[in-house]
Every structure is written in structure tokens, then in C-alpha cells.
Amino acid sequence: MKRVDNRAWDEMRPVKITPGFQSFAEGSVLIKLGKTWVLCSVSVEDRVPAFLKGGGSGWITAEYDMLPRSTVTRSQRDSTLGRVGGRNQEIQRLIGRSLRAAVDLNMLGERTLIVDCDVLQADGGTRTAAITGAYVALYQAMQTLVNMGIISSIPLKCAVAATSVGIVQSYRLLDLCYDEDFNAGVDFNVVMTSRGEFVEVQGTAEGKPFNRETIDDLLSLAGKGIQELFQLQQAVIDKLSKG
């Protein structure tokens, strides 16, 4: 099968992570995954949710949104609707869960790191790009806290990244763009840690149900792509560490 952008079936779209994209955030990156661009920024607040007060633990939460013209047609802002849409709610909870899996929250102290993921341009894979980019922004924010003497060390236990896989016209494909995702008979979003553990696997059959062999094949394909993302994240982090 010839893909719309001429990639091999097991090839990621070009990925570029630019750290420090915003001047005032404790941590920020712009991640470009093909034509999908997501701005991830991290803000630090000296408070935690009520259920954590007095326990000494920190918290990480996320907000996600798409700019009105990030897609072919304009979409309404959540603010004009007076509520956060169901899709955005689902994705921001996924981002928060994914990042918390990589962090020793007790080392943060009673403070909250708020991760904002704003989609500037969308061509499929916005949630997976957001998770992958947000991890690097989170590292930068924690490095800022260390440099300020607020925490003693960076409280990351592992890296976390995500990608999509699916079956389009009977072909297994890595990192689906929008056209591929739209036409997929099966599509998965997979979040993994650098320890080889899964944070989340979201898998759906749009028509014909799939079997266990398909799950195993798609997870292996996702793992290949995520390993490449870990290497890219680490290369950016190494540069940040060197100042």
C-alpha cells in the first residue's frame, strides 16, 4: 500500500521537538509530527488539589485544546460553548495520567505542574504528539525548579511517549496521519514508558473485530515507533542538560 506521504508502513512522520519555545513558561516545547504541531507548556503552582493537602505529594494535571483553524474547517473554542468538550476532557486526562506515570510525585513537594497542550495544526495523532512533547516540557520545568533550588533533583522515574498504529485496507501502519486514521478499520493509541511498560492502550475496531494476534502485532509496531521517540526526547534533553 502506498501511503499518502510516501512513508514505509513502519516509518514515523518526521518529528522535531523545539524546547524553550515560550519565554515565560517554566518549561515549553513545540513538537512537530509531520503536519501535526502541538505547543506544550508547563506552569508551576504552589498548591495541590484538596485530596492531596497535607500529604507532602505533588500533582501533575493537563489541559488540551485545538485552535479554531488547526483543521480544514473552523471549530468553536470551548470557551464559547461554556464547557470543556468530551473529546478534550478525555485527552487531557490521558495526558495527565501518562505524565504522572513517569514522575515521583513525592519529590515534587506540595506543588502542581499544569501542562497546557494547544494544537496549532492537526493532521492526526494530536494526543500522542502532546504526550511526547509534554514529557520534554516537563523535564525542562523540573530542571528550572532544580536551578532555582526549589527541588533537589529532577523527579523523573522514566520517559514516556506515545504513538498511533492501525490497519488501513488490511495493512498495518505506524503513526497514522488524518487520512489514514479516518479510513482505518482498526486504530490504536499506545502510551509506553522507557521501562517497556504500558500506561494506556486505546484500541478500536471500526468494522470487523480484531483478534489477539492483531493486538500483538500492533503493539510491537507501536513499540518500535515509541523507541524512536524516546531517542529523540533524550537527544533534546541532553542538550538542555548541557545548557
Image (cartoon, rainbow, N blue to C red):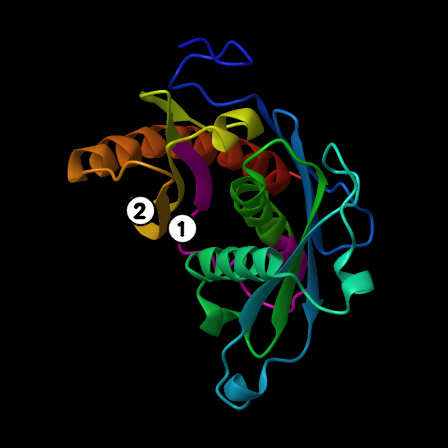
Find numbered disc 1 in the image and state the secondary structure of the residue it sits on. Answer: loop
Residue 117 location in percent, x, y?
66, 51
Query: Residue at image x 42%, y 30%?
Result: 184
Residue 182 location in percent, x, y?
51, 32
Closer to us: 78 or 58 = 78
Find numbered disc 2 in the image and state the secondary structure of the residue it sits on. Answer: loop
Query: Residue at image x 60%, y 80%?
Result: 48
Instruction: Name the residue carrying label 1.
Output: 158
Instruction: Name the residue carrying label 2.
Output: 195
| In this picture, residue 79 sits left or right of residue 133 | right
The amino acid pointed to by label 1 is: Cys
Q: Earlier in the sequence, mark 1 or mark 2?
A: 1
Closer to us: 120 or 83 = 83
Please tell me whether residue 32 is drawn above or below residue 103 in the rendered image.
above
| In this picture, residue 115 sits left or right of residue 205 | right
The amino acid pointed to by label 2 is: Arg
Q: Are marks 1 and 2 in contact (CB under 8 Å)?
A: yes
Please tell me whether residue 142 is drawn above or below residue 234 in the rendered image.
below
Query: Residue at image x 58%, y 34%?
Result: 236
Quarter of image, res 47? bottom right
| Other residues around mark 1 within 10 Å, as few (<14) / some (14–19) / many (≥20) | some
Total numbered labels? 2
| Other residues around mark 2 within 10 Å, as few (<14) / some (14–19) / many (≥20) | few
Quarter of image, res 58? bottom right
Q: Which residues are magenta?
A: 141-165
